[in-house]
Amino acid sequence: QKEVEQNSGPLSVPEGAIASLNCTYSDRGSQSFFWYRQYSGKSPELIMSIYSNGDKEDGRFTAQLNKASQYVSLLIRDSQPSDSATYLCAVNEKDGGFKTIFGAGTRLFVKA
Amino acid sequence: EAQVTQNPRYLITVTGKKLTVTCSQNMNHEYMSWYRQDPGLGLRQIYYSMNVEVTDKGDVPEGYKVSRKEKRNFPLILESPSPNQTSLYFCASSPLTEAGEQYFGPGTRLTVT
């Protein structure tokens, strides 16, 4: 069974700090990696995608991928109370690339 | 407005009574998918579709059916619902063949008694 693992949290950080969210996956052949944000009672929304090793930055968000270690992370700089949400890591299976496996999510609280 | 819509948003039903949850997208996306979300388990894929008349099982397809007769619609059918299908259901669509960058509908909360 292919798996995506995340620490369920909650992760609590003060406003203005860097929040670091981590994810590991079991399928070494996975090619595509995604971070979704889900506010309580709402649907998931895509915030980052990453396909190759290294860092990808978009505003306050940086996604990091290390395929050798099967590890994906999301850094949120200058965290704001509005960043408080559950962050879902998602991985696409290699074969056909059509199945998506989600982690259970990490709850983040940013304290004002 | 580009969106994925689901109906109904809330549904309470009884065991064994067939139901359909509709999903429609107006973005001309090839890929559509259904997920269920349960506390502590995250999102689990039920079925997905690469295009019209092309569907395949996700990780938890038992007890569900789907059809893709039109590109914009992807209904989820529960022929004989059971209490263990009580969950929050999301439909999603994607323009990419890798189907990772998905756009989600607002969700349907289903309770089966």
Image (tube, coloured by chain):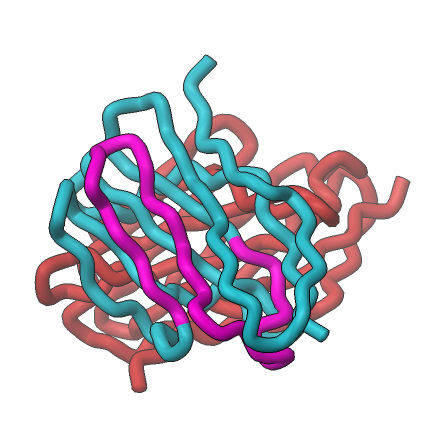
B69 drawn magenta: yes
**Residue drawn at (56%, 64%), measured in percent from left and top?**
B37
Q: Is residue A81 above or below residue B108?
A: above
Residue A68 is situated, as x and y percent measured from the top left of the image, at 22, 72
Residue B78 is situated, as x and y percent measured from the top left of the image, at 45, 65
Magenta region: B64-89
Left or right of B83 in this view: B73: left
Q: Which chain is red?
A: A
**Residue drawn at (64%, 79%), measured in percent from left and top?**
B83
Residue A48 sits in quarter:
top left
* Image quadrant in which the N terminus of chain A is located: bottom left
Q: Residue furthest left?
A: A96
| Picture colour for chain B | cyan
Q: Is residue B17 above or below residue A2?
A: above
**Residue drawn at (23%, 46%), measured in percent from left and top?**
B68
Q: Residue furthest top?
A: B1
Residue B76 is situated, as x and y percent measured from the top left of the image, at 40, 55
Residue A107 sits in quarter:
bottom right
Left or right of B54 in this view: A17: right
A53 drawn magenta: no
* Image quadrant in which the C terminus of chain A is located: top right
Residue A27 is situated, as x and y percent measured from the top left of the image, at 24, 76
Q: Is residue B46 above or below residue B16?
A: above
